[in-house]
Amino acid sequence: MNDTPRNPGLGDTAGQTAANPDIAALNDAGLGTNAQLQARLAAVMYTARYHGVEINLESLRLRPDEPAPSPPVLVEWLREAGLWARGVPMNFRQLIKVDDPSPIVLLLNDGGAALVVGRNRETQTLLLRDPRAGTHDPTIAVDELRLKQVWSGGVLLIRANRAGVEGDPPINLAMLAKLVWGDKTILRDIAIASITITILSLVPILLVMRTISSVMQYRSTDTLDVIIVVLFTAIVFEALLTWGRKTMEVVLGAKLDSRLNLIIFDRLMALPIEFFERQRAGELTYKVQQVNRVREFLTGKLMNTFIDVVMLAILLPVVFFINATLAWTVLVAAALIAVIIAIFLRPLGALTGKIVEAESGKGSVLVESIGGIKTVKALALEPARSADWDRRVAHVAELHIEIGNMANWPASLTLPLQRYCSYGAVTLGAYIALHSNSAFDAGSIAGFMMLGGRVAGPLVSLASIMEDVEKARASIQHVAWVLNRPNEKHALTHGLRPRFEGAIEFDDVTFRYEGTKTPALEKMSFKIPAGTMLGLVGRSGSGKSTITRLLQGINRDYAGSIKVDGNDMREINLRHLRKSFGMVLQENFLFRGSIRENLIAGRPGLSFEDAVRAARLAGAEEFIERMPNGYDTFIQEGSPNLSGGQRQRLAIARALITDPKVLIMDEATSALDPESEALVNANIQRIAKGRTMVIVSHRLSSLLDCDLIMVLDRGRTIDIGTHHELVERCAIYRHLWFQQNRHLAPEGFENDSKTPPALTQGL
């Protein structure tokens, strides 16, 4: 190999060639002037192509004068393209050990990148490729010393998503136990520490037995001194090991908490919108939080039981060695405790389920009252909400009293048996020693008394764990009820990712909402070319919002076919579809944070200039600039410091910031005051330029500039045409138009409007 390799990715800027298709694409996109930016993007595009994916440069929205994108931006970009990606720190030795032939992207210190395409373990060198070099250019062998001069450990790992992998495993006790078992190293260390602690705890007991049996009998002070030293040493080591074991248990619990939180949030976000629309937020929150009880059981009670089993395995042989008869009586008492607890398991489990349901209902009232506090105050609903809250609190209290009374029975019935295991067996041993010729001396009695207590505790714990398992099972059932439902995860991670132009086609589409008999859409068919501004009008319940829901992929269980640019909607990646379509609702939610953060939320690669452009297009720039801190003005929770019109214009700007090819506006101007509505309508032609728009509005005056207006009634297409055509030929549209513009209505309109107009047959 040459000592001075020509490698732009390692500092040299020469060697670019037209033979590299990625460089040609970057030049076409106007990104050929920034060497570091070009190298990093070319490396990512090369690796994506290796895995069979062509990624879209336009979705990154970079400018030539911007610095190279950071790893989080690249990871998000790759994930949107359907690849698995992660930025991780690695060292040279780890790179050498990798067996996967896939290219690895090295993120260089100067903002550029290089590709690891091979490794030579004999010479301890990595084979690097310059991402800007030609496809037939040779690779370069680089050792650790040379690589460290330009690289500090940043790596981007990329691979194809496993399309054939089964869905997420159902959440149950077995799944959570598997999560715990994933930390085998910590569990092994805890087991070793537990065994050592148990052995060390035996030392004082055996020494005390020796002290009572021999030292006091023969008055051997030297032996007593040795015993004291050994006892002190054993106690110190036991304390240190106990501290270490507890630390490992805390680490294990924290790791499991983190994994569970990630899994739960991921599952929740993958659930379809219609599920959240049918459920109460407070109820869902409380049921999901039950997973914390299960986690506490797995890392608390179950972990302690695991430790108890280790202790029993060591202590029981010693106890049987001291006196087998007493040891058997302790085991029989523990078995009776287990039987008593088992009798009460089923009724206790049923009551636990009722408590969870009652608590979730109570939590729902609290969440609804806080979320709707404006309505509660405006309508003076405090007494009604308080009465509902009192009723639910009383019901929960009754259930807690009932389960407490029932739990008292096994606790009371097992108490004598527990006391026998603790000190009753010792009394029996003393009786046996006094009334028989047994060699059960005072030292043995003292030893059994101390060991019996240590054995009795784990035995009782083992017997009572069945109750904890039943409670954990009841809790996990409520978690599973929420998280084990069919979700959109496959649709969000798989499917086509086409470049959209905006042509939309409905072909014989029929859809009905769950629990209803009447279809929301019935055999609906229409087709609009890309760049069309389509208005949707009709009476309430005619299916206007249903069309927008189907276009967003919210509901996918429809009959017929919906196509976007010739691609079937069901085959398009759902996340790609929603990120490519802009959506403005009648009521839009703004996140707690600044105006700028709300506008560019979750959109890597977007800049402040993009936010300003979108705000100007939506007519929001004028009021943003009047704010105390402009685009950095903080929006409080619920947006109380913004008017309805301001919130709506920010929502429009947020939808426009990615320059979507399809923009859906569902009653987007209904909350605007006349001045704000006029401002948005004045910009509507600018907003519509180069994109398809679907506008739902009851105000027909806001649809006058639409290329086409579609009239709906009872889920059917009645007519499609321009405003002037529909006024002439469509009775429903004419009726709605003159109803809103009475000064233009012909003579006799009032009488005619008393009866519903006849429906005309549409296209």
Image: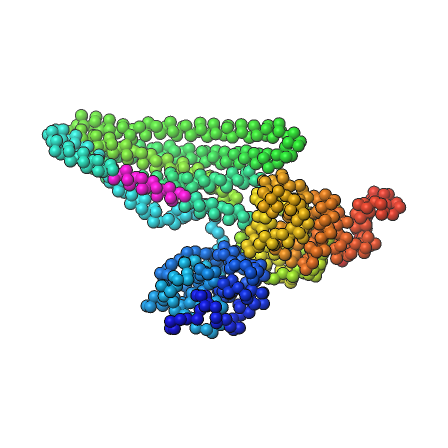
Whether residue 550 is visible to the viewer of this picture, yes or no, is: no
> In the rendered structure, which segment of residues is drawn in magenta?
237-254
Visual colour scheme: rainbow
> Which is more toward the observer, 342 or 290?
290
The number of numbered discs placed on residues in the rendered structure image is: 0
Return the x and y of residue 603 as percentages of the image width and height: 56, 53
The C terminus sits in image quarter: bottom right
Point out residue 530 in the picture as x, y percentages from the top left corner. Answer: 68, 61
Displayed quadrant of residue 574: bottom right
Q: Is residue 710 left or right of residue 179?
A: right
The percent position of residue 364, horizontal first and vertical second, equals 56, 36
Q: Is residue 175 visible?
A: yes
What residue appears at the point 51 percent right and 59 percent down from the top-left corner? Answer: 68
Q: Residue visible at 63% across and 56% down?
A: 659
Q: Quadrant of the N terminus?
A: bottom left
Residue extending furthest right?
A: 747
* Residue in the foreground of this view, choosing between 194 and 426: 194
Residue 497, percent from left and from top: 58, 60
Magenta span: chief secondary structure: helix
Q: Which residue sits at x=38%, y=44%? A: 252
Q: Is residue 639 left or right of residue 686?
A: left
Is residue 401 one of those drawn in magenta? no
- In depth, the one of 161 and 446 nearer the eye is 161
Choose between 368 and 140: the one closer to the eye: 140
Q: Does residue 394 appear left or right of residue 145 in this picture?
A: right
Residue at screen point 39% across, 62% down: 149
